[in-house]
Amino acid sequence: MMMESACDPGELSELVEPSFDEFQRQTSLMTTCTLLWKELSDHFTSLENNLLSKSLSLNRKISSLHHSTDTSLRLLNHRDSSLDHSLHLILSDLNSHRQAALQLIQQQQDQDSDDNNKQDSPLMLKLKSFCLTMDALGFWEFVIGKKKELETLRSQIPIALSECVDPPKFVLEAISEVFPVDKRVEKGGNDLGWACVLILESLIPVIIDPIIGNSRLLLTPTVKDKANQIALTWKETLKQRGGIHNLKTPDVHTFLQHLVTFGIVDKDHDLHFYKKLVIASAWRKQMPKLALSLGLLNQMPDIIQELISKGQQLDAVHFTYEVGLVDNFPPVPLLKSFLKDAKKVAASISEDPNNAGRAAYLAARKEQSALKAVIKCIEEYKLEAEFPPENLKKRLEQLEKVKPEKRKPAAVPANKRTRTSNSTGGPMPPAKAGRLTNAYVSSFPAAPAFVRSPSHGQYPAALPPYPSPPHMYGSRSPPYAYSPEPAPAIAGSYPAPPPMNYPPAYGGYGNVLAPTYQQAYYHR
């Protein structure tokens, strides 16, 4: 009986019906596991790709570092191996210059004593004479007396300086009369910054290494220390001269050129100081190049923006082209803004009650100078397609026809034309005798007294363009004009020096303005 009641293991006693909920639970679990597996797989794949990318990047950097190291080592080896050759050339030149100086002293500086000198001009002979005998003071006096021959001086001074036994020392002694401190007892209103910059620029091709080039300047530690001391003295006297904003632009230009010429730019501590100086004298043609040589490349966007905010749009355009920021600061809107400001200033002049008889003429002159500057800039940077100058030229022709209105002399009563003197009792001279109003040096017949724009500074009387120095900063720098600080009287003029492979950028913008013209219109 017990055997019959036992269950047969091969026989299903009772089938359990599957649960649908259990099936859904199992399905959901499988889906979750699948998604989790895919997520983990993607995550590890991403980590692997990131590691591979970083590994490749690191390998590239290591390869670049090895290449840079190899290049630097090759350059150092080249500098080291070329040093003996450079020193040999320098010593050879030094001996020849010493012998030439001795011969010159013994031969009474006679032009006929040396057949080689027959090909030199009298100016070159004189310059060489000062350089060979290391007569720095005589050289300085001679150069400042030849202001009208700057173009010739610029081409011949570097040749003459190469005859010096010690050109850097000679230059420092030559300019020491006015830089870093003007030692003249009677300055006579003559600013000699143009001569300092001319001589400093002329030294550059003389002191570059004949083998390596301008990457190594042939300056002794003693000369560099002296140049550094001069720069420090100049900075220490800033407060005595009223600070940066009261400095004369030629003085600033001389200081910056001094730093670049002697390779003593302090890029670690003085960049902010250099930036202020550049902005204060941004209208100078050489400032964009000097700014780059001073290490202000990263500061250029801020400099350009500040120039724009000050209403110096034309200066900003030149800076943008110099550093390649034309896409960031398109030139055409800046030029249009410049003309818009010019019209506002012209309108304020025309409403000036103090110049009722000449207001239209003075306003026309103001707008005329701005138009000439913009047209020049358009032609220089080939912007005719974006900013056609035809309408500007037509407007310029209209303004050139505006003539000043002659004032009629007012009738003066007889009792006001004579007076009794305690001593002579004679009649007083005519009312206008000895009186000059608004006198200035200009290519135009009369000298207007313009209303200063609230957003612009004033600049001095315009001078003929002063071309750029020998090649040091780059391949594109325009000529520039040297002039003293704003002065309502006389501004000297002098010819332009030969170019340093720079295109004629910025040239001649200042030649149409009176001394009290608004800065943005005068400075070019």
Image: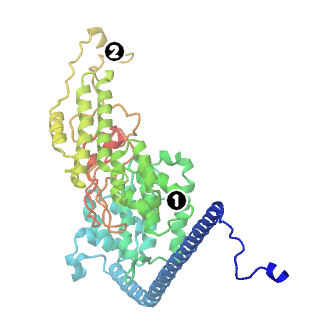
Label 2 neighbour load within 10 Å: few <14, some 14-19, many 20+: few
Q: Nearer the viewer, residue 224 or 351?
A: 351
Quadrant (top left, top right, bottom left, bottom right) of the N terminus: bottom right
Q: Is residue 434 visible?
A: no
Residue that label 1 marks:
271
The amino acid marked with disc number 2 is Gly
Q: Secondary structure at mark 2?
A: loop
| Residue in the image at 32% along x and 32% along y | 345
| Residue in the image at 72% along x and 74% along y | 13
| Residue in the image at 24% along x and 81% along y | 113
Q: Is residue 312 visible?
A: yes
The amino acid marked with disc number 1 is Leu
Please provide percent x and percent y for residue 62.
Answer: 52, 82
Ranked by sequence position, the earlier of labels 2 and 1 is 1
Horizontal side, residue 230 vs residue 24: left or right: left
Residue farthest to the front?
Answer: 1
Q: As displayed, is residue 168 above or below residue 386?
A: below
Q: Nearer the viewer, residue 58 or 360?
A: 58
Q: CA distance from mark 2 to mark 1?
A: 68 Å
Please provide percent x and percent y for residue 424.
Answer: 34, 18
Q: Nearer the viewer, mark 2 or mark 1?
A: 1
Please provide percent x and percent y for residue 433.
Answer: 27, 25
In the drawing, what numbered circle is on residue 425?
A: 2
Q: As displayed, is residue 515 above or below residue 44?
A: above
Please provide percent x and percent y for residue 71.
Answer: 45, 84
Q: As displayed, is residue 326 above or below residue 138?
A: above
| Residue in the image at 40% along x and 51% along y | 282
